[in-house]
Amino acid sequence: MSRGPDGVLEPRLRLGGVVARGAAYGVIAALCLVVTALVLREHGDRVDLLEAATYLGLLTGTVLLLTGLFFWACSSGEVLRRRDFFATSGPHDVVSIAGPALVRAGVFLLLPVPFAFGLGELVASAAYGSWLWGV
């Protein structure tokens, strides 16, 4: 990577790369969520954790992703990295930095949702006394 004539790192960010990095972080978050859910011993605590992760992740992730995509579209190709913050020329350029950050955070929060929902359904329908049910 090198700096362009305006002091901004080249090449510019691409949507696919930002989504891929958010998905990688989301996979790690999903693994942490599954491990945490299985470490909890009480059945009610497991179900509550998985339901909260499902609904809060879905709501927050959707809002962040849609806001980030809107900012990305508003930046009209001038998408910047966070380290380019001091190379901005005005307050309106901050949208070019916030767009990719919000897209990455939205994908990061949305990826664990199917895992949490699926595991929550499995835990809720597990037979009483099984290892999946808990204590």
Image (cartoon, helix red, strand yellow):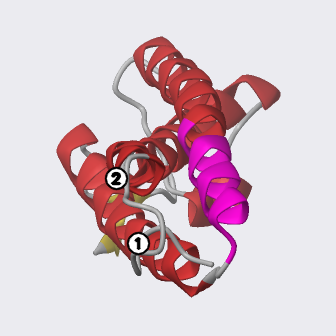
Rendered position, 74 above or below 37: above
Residue sitting at x 47%, y 63%: 128
Q: Mark number for residue 122?
A: 2
Quadrant in which residue 23 is drawn: bottom left
Residue sitting at x 57%, y 86%: 39
Rendered position, 94 above or below 37: above
Are the residues flagged by discs 1 and 2 in contact, CB closer than 8 Å?
A: yes
The mark that comes first in sequence, 1 or 2, is: 2
Quadrant of the snapshot with the C terminus:
bottom right
Residue sitting at x 64%, y 81%: 41
Task: Tell which of 108 and 102 is nearer to you.
Answer: 108
**Amino acid type indicated by mark 2:** Leu
Residue lying at the far left of the rendered structure:
16
**Amino acid type indicated by mark 1:** Leu
Residue 51 in percent (x, y) is at 60, 42
Secondary element under disc 1, as helix, strand or loop, is loop
The part of the chain drawn in magenta is 42-54
